[in-house]
Image (tube, rainbow, N blue to C red):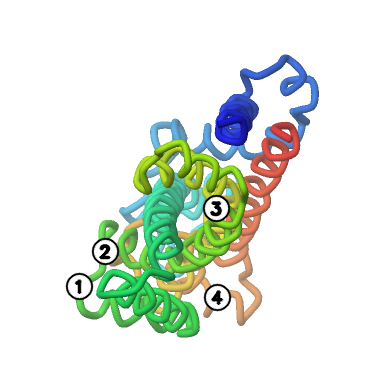
Amino acid sequence: MTGSVGARADKIAWVARASGRSTPGFWRRFRWPRLAPAALLLVMGAIGPSIVRYNPVRIAGPGSIAPGAEFWMGTDPTGLDVYSQLVAATRLNLAIATLVALLSTASGIVLGLLIGMNESRTGPIGLAARGIARFVDFAQAVPAIVVGLVLVSFFGASATTLVVAIAAILAPIQTRIVRVEVLRVRSEAFLDAARMAGTGEFALALQHVLPNAARPAVANIAFIFGVSIILTAALGFLGAGLPPPTPEWGSMIARGATDAAVGRWWSASFPFLALIFSVVAMSLAFTAWRRAAR
């Protein structure tokens, strides 16, 4: 009983620390300057499309115009305003990456918990858990971009398809992390004490194993977010992303690649820089939150 109570207290303390309500020290430890790039990115995604100068999906002028007073970031080879496309693409890419991070993490936590709690059992349940674990290992071994191309070719290019496909690609990463943590937590003495106190396996998994095993997966969200942005752009660059002229960083880079090869750098460089900036900004924000929550 003492071990069970102590584990429950540890779980409550961690949840409180993660939400920032356990102590004012969280806010003192939080490095606010690290949040500024992510805040700028979120503001651009929220209000940017309403303040663009030109319609991002309609021709704004001659093709391949250099940056200037009329076109702040120039135009691409088709005559689309690069600035308007860049700002509009920010909302779409951030939305896709956010949904992918949430979906892949949630499914990875559930699947990792089920595998870790059942793979040592005998009978059909244990056999199924071990089979799913081997499938997860195999899925992670296949190159992500290949899986993405196959899924998009089967189900078509749409925002929903991209979210589901990339989440399916990245979920095995979270699943393996949670599974390893479940196997570690299962060997702790406080679980044996909880079983002796009459706690069932289902309640044991939810009350004690899940809070401890989910922690590393939550901390890994920044990585999942960054990889999802890169995969979305990669599929768009290869022509398997959203159909043109939908504003998306990868397709913008692909359209500007021919211009960049002859020295007209702007139509490919600006979305490339936005891609890098978004990954770095979110990584800094998640790192600041994780360190402050310790």
Disc 3 versus disc 1: nearer the observer: 3
**Residue at 52% from the left image edge and 57% from the top image edge:** 182
Give SS at disc 4: helix
Residue, disc 4: 259
Residue, disc 2: 161
State yes or no: discs 3 and 1 in contact (Cβ < 8 Å).
no
State yes or no: discs 2 and 3 in contact (Cβ < 8 Å).
no
Amino acid beneath label 2: Thr
Q: Position of residue 281 (x, y in %)?
A: 66, 46
Disc 2 versus disc 4: nearer the observer: 2
Left or right of residue 35: residue 71: left
Q: Earlier in the sequence, mark 1 or mark 2?
A: 1
**Residue at 65% from the left image edge and 27% from the top image edge:** 17
Residue, disc 3: 217
Name, please, the residue furthest toward the front. Answer: 196
Q: CA distance from mark 2 to mark 4?
A: 30 Å
Amino acid beneath label 1: Phe
Q: Position of residue 150 (x, y in %)?
A: 30, 82
Amino acid beneath label 3: Ala
Residue, disc 1: 155
Disc 2 versus disc 3: nearer the observer: 3
Amino acid beneath label 4: Asp
Left or right of residue 113: residue 69: right
Q: Earlier in the sequence, mark 2 or mark 4?
A: 2
Q: Earlier in the sequence, mark 3 or mark 1?
A: 1
State yes or no: discs 1 and 2 in contact (Cβ < 8 Å).
yes
